[in-house]
Amino acid sequence: MSMAQQAEPAVTTPPAPGPKQTDGRTRERSVALRVLARPEVGVFLGAVAVFVFFLIAAPTLRDGGSMATVLYQSSTIGIMALPVALLMIGGEFDLSAGVAVVTSALTAGMLSYQLTMNVWMGVVVALVASLAVGAFNGWVLVKTGLPSFLVTLATFLVLQGVNLAVTKLVTGNVATDDISDMDGFDQAKAVFASSFDVGGVEVKITVVWWLVFAALATWVLLRTKYGNWIFAVGGSQESARAVGVPVTFTKITLFMLVGFGAWFVGMHQLFSFNTVQSGEGVGQELIYIAAAVIGGCLLTGGYGSAIGPVFGAFMFGMVNQGIVFAGWNPDWFKAFLGVMLLGAVLINLYVRRAATRR
């Protein structure tokens, strides 16, 4: 056979392109599933349901003044629920948050009255004391490795006893003296406990602070390196430390943020009522934690948002005032909270599983 008669090389035709093959690891989730994966979606749906329910059961809630009251109740819970939620995302929680609010108010009130100084001095000292309590909780936690449950339970008991004993020792009573006639009171009240008019409805300044703090916390979580650190230490502390996350700094500052929240709410209580009862605050820490859990934060850490606790606090305020406006027995309030907490956790669990199911 001659060279010219040798066969031409075969030309292979590539197969026609077919549909792109993907597996479960590379399949892109739909927009709906990505939305459902957000931790605040479940509580938003629950808040809408509770809102509609009480609008029907308690028609007086449709009045602007009644809704302003609901928002006020929600804000006093929500301001504290925000730092508590950040701490929970970081893998810890604080049982002393409720009595710490009262400690800050007592410190500012007694210091200002007993030393006859401008109330702003008491406010500043109370801030330092609240931050110090938070820093102490965080420092003991990271240095000893004890669970935050034990550390903050001990702080809870100490503050509860100190609040009552020191108040009785200094004032001879279980409450602080009235500071409404002292220098700086009106200016401090304008910052922490004033009201303003919106369309003929009186709205408390705490509602504005609540929304401002929520926006700031959301920005920190989603747009800053510190927010990444919070999620990292909550997900796996050892892994976070291995990649250079300052675990000690993050944990301590998260507890200090709770201290800041306790100080702010404490100042609101002091300048709203001019005096503070030393035995208050017990049990409030569970309300703050429950608002964060209802808002989608996991007790195990590493998951949650700042928007979720806003809706969680709103649900608490709605139930609290809705029962009153509906004319029901207020003794049912805690039962409603328990049912709402369990329902919200189950809804969040179902939504999260549905969103991540392949």
Image: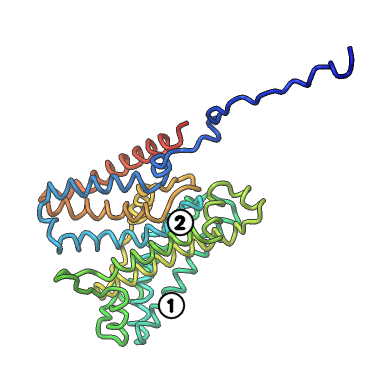
- Residue under the image location 41 percent in, 74 percent down: 126
Q: What residue is shown with label 2?
A: 86
**Contact (Cβ within 8 Å) of mark 1 with mark 2:** no
Amino acid type for the residue under numbered disc 1: Val
Q: Nearer the viewer, residue 219 or 121?
A: 219
- Left or right relative to 217: residue 57: left
Q: Give the vertical position of 68 relative to 153 (above or below).
A: below
Few, some or many C-alpha atoms within 10 Å of disc 2 (few <14, some 14-19, many ≥20)?
many
Amino acid type for the residue under numbered disc 2: Leu
Residue 61, image x and y in percent?
14, 56
Sequence-earlier tag: 1 or 2: 2
Few, some or many C-alpha atoms within 10 Å of disc 1 (few <14, some 14-19, many ≥20)?
some
Q: What residue is shown with label 1?
A: 125
Q: Nearer the viewer, residue 345 or 2?
A: 2
- Residue under the image location 39 percent in, 38 percent down: 349
Residue 319, image x and y in percent?
22, 51
